[in-house]
Image: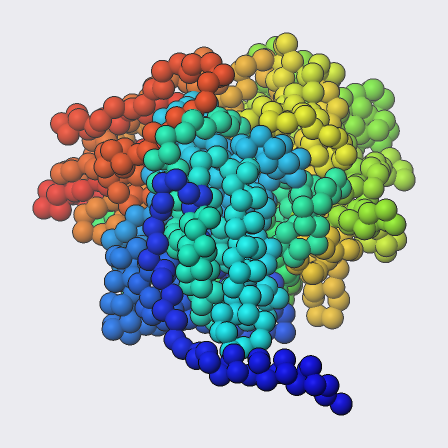
Amino acid sequence: MITANTAVLFAVLMTAICAVQSEYIEYNTTHRIIPNKINVHLVPHSHDDVGWLKTVDQYYVGSNNSIRGACVQNVLDSVMSALLEDQNRKFIYVEMAFFQRWWRQQSKAMKLKVKELVNSGQLEFINGAMCMHDEATPHYIDLIDQTTLGHQFIKDEFGKIPRVGWQIDPFGHSAVQAYLLGAELGFDSLFFARIDYQDRAKRLKDKTLEIVWQGSKSLGSSSQIFTGIFPRHYDPPDGFTFEIHDVSSPIQDDILLFDYNVEERVNDFVSAALAQANVTRTNHIMWTMGTDFRYQYANSWFRQMDKFIHYVNQDGRVNALYSTPSIYTDAKYAANEKWPLKIDDFFPDLKSDLRIQLFRYADHPNAYWTGYFTSRPALKGYVRVMSGYYQAAKQLEFFKGRNKSGPNTDALANALALAQHHDAVSGTERQHVAADYAKRISIGYAEAEGLVASALALLVNQRLSSHVMNPITGFQQCPLLNISYCPPSETTLDNGKSVVIVVYNPLAWKREEVIRIPVSTAEVFVQDSAGKKIESQLLPVSNITSSIRKKYVKAYIGTAPSRELRYWLAFPVSVPPIGFSTYIVSRPRQTGHVSTISKEFRSEGSTNNSIEVGQGNLKLLYSANEGKLTHYVNNRNLVTASVEQSYSFYSGNVGDDKDSQASGAYVFRPNGSFPIKSDQQASFTVLRGPILDEVHQQLNPWVSQIVRIYQAKEHAEVEFTIGPIPVDDGIGKEVITQFSTTMKTNKTFYTDSNGRDFIKRIRDFRTDWDLEVNQPVAGNYYPVNLGIYMQDSGMELSVLVDRSVGGSSLVDGQVELMLHRRLLHDDARGVGETLNETVCIADKCEGLTIQGKLYLRIDRKDEGAKWRRTVGQEIYSPLLLAFTEQDEDNWLHFQQPTFSGIDSSYSLPNNTALLTLQDFGNGKVLLRLAHLYEVGEDKDYSVTANVELKRLFPNKKISKVTEMSLSANQERGEMEKRKLVWKVEGGFTEESKVVRGGPVDPTKLVVELAPMEIRTFFVDFDLLQTVHAAENHVM
């Protein structure tokens, strides 16, 4: 029953509503920066992973939505429509892998509209690479390549140059990102979200979230960058997310509707702005208006931002505006503030995960994101191998001549670019997504393999005498050589047939190495293309090798190998810079020409206490009774050290009542360490020969290794085989190896940054804050891409790796590396899947087996850099082997034994490397040269180096040399003119003068490289005065 008073109130209300008319409101979104107010820069963005829970194409088209409802195509369609509705709206986009897909599908009319949006600044490309790459696990060359690919697309299609780095989601941040993938690209600033929660808390308190970051001690202030760390995650403040299904309250400004809330929401906005302003210097703050895969219905965001800008600015307490990181950076620069200085990097990372809002701003001391440094080691290894292959293929593409329609390197380039994503090579994606990355690389490799084969055939045929009747039509390669499968080298050598091996060297210095190929018979003889006998050695194939070969060949090609493999054939090769040598394997014609079969020694029954292994300067001593490494002796530099190697595993933590955090794809949370020991004496066999010695050890059914000591080398090569890791006991395992010495290292060790600079690490210590140690193991792990080393007053121990792993020194005198992980629980960081990789053959599945290599050397103190830098390059760029079968006599007509793409009497200085030699068409080549050493790293090689371009291209007439930015999208001189010079707070020592290479004289054509400098050039050739490289580049 309605009372009289209620009736009166209802009548009054109806009268008031009838007196007001609902009408169209034109929102004023034209506001710009106001000097004396807090300016809230609203930056609309969508963070679009190029693979994570779904594959890159599933994310793009919006398929497989049972996993996640995400469609990047919808995002871009919707955003363009929304931008065209209001010229004041802005949007930034990052991932060119997605934008390229969308761009290809647009009409000419739409492309014109989008170009207008770009030219007006409404749509801005930020970062501009193919993906938002990981910063812990990729190699720096891959980072450069994938960024160049995206920047060239933007330059070609829009004529624009990205100004800002936007690494908002990677799980830690490297020094290389700051100076190389930041300042050297011409970026004015870099922004990201994820740092250690202890670090963030201190920075919030001290107002040091925005800094000037010097990532390189060698390049110093010449390559520093303004860096902003978001005060929380890369999403908006609480209450300001506006996707269709988000729960934030929209502004309801229609007075005829219930829940009118303009004043309330304006107050919310101002309150959040003031809170952020209190932890930020200057009167400018940035709100990242978006997060993962947002703006699928862009108007739901822009409608609310339009209203907030309109009503907040009417309120007048703060100023809100549509903005971009570029506008924000310019505003920060104009404030003329002095900023704190940051050196080194942001590893390791300990945080709550804001991606899925589990522990928002809560301390979480057991969540160190250091497990992914090793996760999915097979994929990490595949990416690294294919990266080196891609560099070699680009060189051969240059010598052959690029063909856009024929086999080329494009597909491999795109596949490798995607693989650098922070949920790809990192190993933090779902299994079917990891398979998709690998499949794309495999497809790209197949096309590049065809290019390499045809290029080598072209170069070889031009060296054969004219009367040779059987020119080479193609070469076979062996992509499964890592599992001891190479059909062309295993062929039966009957009826005068021989296997010809072309050995290509992609490095710009001469190499003397030993190659190993599988053969099916002991009756083999090796000679070079001039007919000279090459000493060779046969090594019996181990049982482990045979088992892996049978199992994995069947897994890859569907059938087991047709024959048993008996031997590895090893022999030394000498290969010129950026060129090849040829070798012939055949049946011996004369007695005594057969390869030497290794002598086998077993530890059983030995009366000696120790066994010495090694035929050259390097000797390793093993205990005869246990088969353990005990000493390292180098007779040349007189280094003698006590050293042991062991294997262990960490039990993966599954969480407990106090903390449910488990060890998983991202997080490393160990629950105790357990040595891996054999129940009986480990199988211990030594193979000796004139080329190398091998030590075969099997610790248990799932851990074994072969240690190789080459007669002409002074390091040990450790080939480990791990898997299938047993989990029948319900315990996930994270397998490590340790090298232990008596060195006094004072908690100090060194790890590389993306294969480039080495950074000093101190156990249980952080440079920027007083570390609270909660996880003494995981909290001291760092990414290792090139190597790890430690030193004391007299010696230096170095271990190099063939892929990204996690590593540390948890005890003085010891280094450890995590090699494989198999876990049974998800770590609740969003991937929603356990890291339990398996291989299935028919209906039988078992855990993944990993085979990889480590390289060990001990030097006198401060003498290890030469080896680390030289061998590090050789590991990244291994010799490329190509095979063909020919009549033996044909090869006696070779006019010249080798080919080199550069002057026959020239090689690059020992402290430099040729990173990129890539045909850009129309007589233009992209050339990158790098200095390999840091300032003070080596007494001989940390000096300026000179590279002579005339001798690098001896048969081409160079018409023009233009120095470019790192990604080759702008001239270096113009980039330097536009560079913002930031002021830095006092309290730091004045740096010594930074040395950079000078301009290239157009007559002398000599490039100077200072320590750690990478210089990028476009080199133009006079096509009318060019002699084909294949005609005269011989030795």
Q: Give x and y (percent) for residue 45.
A: 46, 57
- In this view, the residue farthest toward the bottom is 1
- Quadrant in the picture for residue 116: bottom left
Q: Quadrant of the N terminus?
A: bottom right
Determine whether, in the image, residue 208 is placed left or right of residue 671.
left
Looking at the image, can residue 265 be seen?
yes
Q: Quadrant of residue 791?
A: top right
Which color scheme is applied?
Answer: rainbow
User: Which residue appears at 59% of the width and 46% of the height?
Assistant: 232
Q: Residue at x 20, y 31 (%)?
A: 950
Give above or below for 595 relative to 410.
above
Task: Name the spot of residue 510 as percent of width and height, x first.
Answer: 39, 30
Front residue of 680 and 278: 278
Identify which residue, 725 or 558, lies in the foreground. 725
Relative placement, left or right, of 178 versus 406 is: right
Residue 822 is situated, as x and y percent measured from the top left of the image, at 74, 51
Q: Is residue 584 above or below residue 176?
A: below
Q: Residue pushed farthest left?
A: 1024
Q: Residue at x 69, y 41 (%)?
A: 368
Which residue occupies 13% across, 27% down? 1003
The answer to whether 685 appears left or right of 9 in the picture is: right
How many numbered dots are placed on residues in this image? 0
431 or 205, nearer to the observer: 205
181 left or right of 86?
right
Q: Quadrant of the C terminus?
A: top left
**Residue 709 x, y percent position in the rendering:** 62, 28
Residue 101 seen? no
